[in-house]
Amino acid sequence: MAKIIGTAGGAGQQPPKQPKLDLKASKPMVCTDCGFDIFVSGAKFRTISRLVTSTPQDVIIPIDVYLCGDCGKVNEKLLPEEIKKLDSKNNG
């Protein structure tokens, strides 16, 4: 997954210093399905059984994802590598 600059580290932490970047050297990210260039945040959820975690309840893990603002397709380039691997196992 590419590093997304401008995101804060966590509660009480200062956001990391942003490098000076020239936007003229950038290129837009667009949806691979429809070409739209605005994305909205969403979440995927995974669960781990309480039997595996030895906790009183199943554990729910939220994973941030970005979806195309037009067609709703998840932008795979912005998914963590671990999730890409899990998703390819489940779909393959």
Image (tube, rainbow, N blue to C red):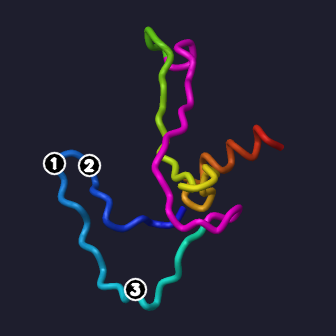
Instruction: Find disc 1 in the rendering and name its residue.
Output: 12
Toward the right, the furthest residue is 92
Out of 68 and 74, give the one closest to the viewer: 68
Task: Report the quarter where the C terminus lies.
Answer: top right
User: Residue 10 at x, y = what percent?
Assistant: 26, 49
Which residue is under mark 2?
Answer: 10
Q: Residues within 10 Å of mark 3 (few under 14, many from 20)?
A: few
State how far apart marks 2 and 1 are (Cα).
6 Å
Give the label on residue 23, or none: 3
| Amino acid of disc 1 | Gly
Label 1 vs 3, first from the N-terminus: 1
36 vs 8: above or below: below
Disc 3 to disc 2, C-alpha distance: 26 Å
In the depicted structure, whether residue 10 falls above or below residue 23: above
- Mark in the foreground, 3 or 2: 3
Left or right for 74, reference 21 = right
The amino acid at mark 2 is: Gly
Q: Residues within 10 Å of mark 1 (few under 14, many from 20)?
A: few
Placement of the N terminus among the 4 image quadrants = bottom right
Which region shows up in magenta? Answer: 31-53
Q: Residue at x 24, y 72 (%)?
A: 17
Taking the spot 57% from the left edge, 17% from the top edge, the residue there is 49
Picture coordinates of residue 75 (x, y %)? 60, 57
Answer left or right for 64 relative to 22.
right
**Residue at 61%, 49% in the rendered image:** 72
Which of disc 2 and disc 3 is earlier in sequence? 2
Viewer-nearest residue: 23 or 68: 68
Q: Are marks 2 and 1 in contact (CB under 8 Å)?
A: yes
